[in-house]
Image (cartoon, rainbow, N blue to C red):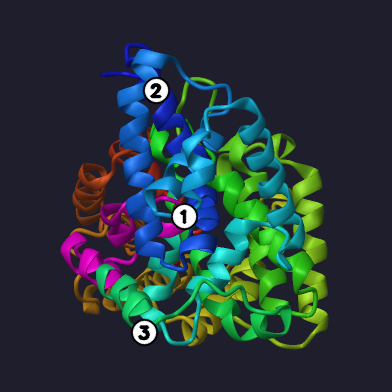
Amino acid sequence: MDAARRPPAAAMAEQAARASYGRLVALVSARTRDIAAAEDALAEAFAAALAQWGEQGVPANPEAWLLTVARRAAGHQSARAATAARAEDVLALLAEEREDTETSPFGDERLALLFVCAHPAIDPDAQAPLMLQTVLGLDAARIAGAFLVSSTAMGQRLVRAKRKIRDAGIAFAVPDLAEAPQRLGGVLSAIYAAYGTAWDDTLGADTRLAGLRSEALFLARLTAELLPGEAEALGLLSLILHCEARQSARRAPDGTFVALHAQDPGLWSREMVAEAEAALRRAAAMASPGRFQTEAAIQSLHAHQRMTGERFTAPLARLYDVLAGFAPTTGVMVARAVAHAENGASGPALEQLHSMEGVSSYQPWWAALARVSWLAGDAEGAAAAAATAAGLSADPAIRTFLLGGGYRFAAASSGPDESR
């Protein structure tokens, strides 16, 4: 059933879940000190909303209502929850929430919860996925796609992480800002993965990703403000700003995909580009290079290529070599192959792509193979790879681009697809 035909109660509950899930988990966890229990309590609250809002009407403040019911379900503040429907209690609850936010050293409960999930006792491989599910509300299947593992494996990873939090007594204890740098890596990875997940949903077709790009940008900005001496926080902010600046140019008015080489820079946000460049310069001045600074530098060169008409294929290939040293992930190695092919080394780039394992269902690999094969003079192989890439894409505009031979002129993406 589409949103227009969905009962008002269900539509409002869904909207509250999309907009407030991470914040609600953070607020409930602050009392329960148990993330899994907080999620269970919220599940009960959403179920209660579906049952009651249809009969009693949607409350004036759905988020406050859900928070009250979730806290009651978690077994806390039962006396207050018994009278939660009264207006004065809702006002008191909102005042309490404002006080909680103001006293947090991180300025935002979602960011605080990200740093909680980066506790050193939690498996590093589980930290970013745990943040994506708990704070940003992504389901296990979507998180699995972001990290190129099966949904089953990701679900098990998340369950193990939450069980360890519970069994080891890892409390919901917001670290001091002095401890934040030691936990920063996982937080930055989660914010970037969140942004990358929503990157291709330019038209807003997937309601489950509504607001995720702006949420990731907000968190990146806040992290860089809180930790101004951390070069990688500035690098991530620069990277996201460069990508976000081009959003309005990535689709034509009719929805057609527009590759970077054909975009009108006049449609880009010059304010965001300037902010991105300033953040990257500040990071570079710290002389502490890292993954996100390198990715930001790559995006900066892409932007300068388009704005000036110059070709920076050699510097881009070198930057991808540096990036591969920091993060030799599947996505990075795929993008690196394309960069080297654009710089004239299409033969070695093809060898690199064909040497990779576990990429048969990875759409960017097939799209890259189409581009690199074309540059290597294999038109038939390029067309076949493009057809496979199109079949693996959920975006009709990308499918049209690939099937229409767009790979002959440019790669299908120059965005944050290296997170995997």
The image shows residue 296 at horizontal and vertical percentages of 64, 67
Image position, residue 416 (x, y; %): 50, 59
Residue found at x 61% / y 62% = 111
Above-or-below relation of 272 to 84 = below
Q: Is residue 170 left or right of residue 285?
A: left
Magenta residues span 134-158
Q: Is residue 136 magenta?
A: yes
- Residue 69 horizontal side relative to residue 289, left or right: left
Name the residue that disc number 3 marks. Answer: 168
| Secondary structure type for disc 2 | helix
Q: Residue at x 56, y 36 (%)?
A: 64
* Farthest-out residue, front: 79
Q: Residue at x 43, y 38 (%)?
A: 17
Q: Quadrant of residue 206?
A: top left
Q: Position of residue 162 (x, y in %)?
A: 33, 71
Disc 3 crowd rating (10 Å Cα; few below 14, some 14-19, many 20+) is: few
**Which mark is first along the chain, 2 or 3?**
2
Residue at x 38% of width, y 33% of height: 397
- Name which residue type carries label 1: His
Residue that numbered label 1 is attached to:
76
Q: Nearer the viewer, residue 377 or 118?
A: 118
Q: CA distance from mark 3 to mark 2?
A: 38 Å
Q: Disc 3 versus disc 1: distance between alpha carbons?
A: 22 Å
Between 104 and 375, the residue placed more toward the observer is: 104
Identify the main secondary structure in magenta.
helix
Q: Nearer the viewer, residue 201 or 6?
A: 6
Q: Is residue 74 left or right of residue 357?
A: right
- Up-down relation of residue 379 to residue 298 (above or below): above
Q: Give the image quarter of residue 298.
A: bottom right
Neighbour tally class for label 2: few under 14, some 14-19, many 20 plus, Cα within 10 Å = some
Mark drawn on residue 11: 2
* Circle 1 SS class: loop
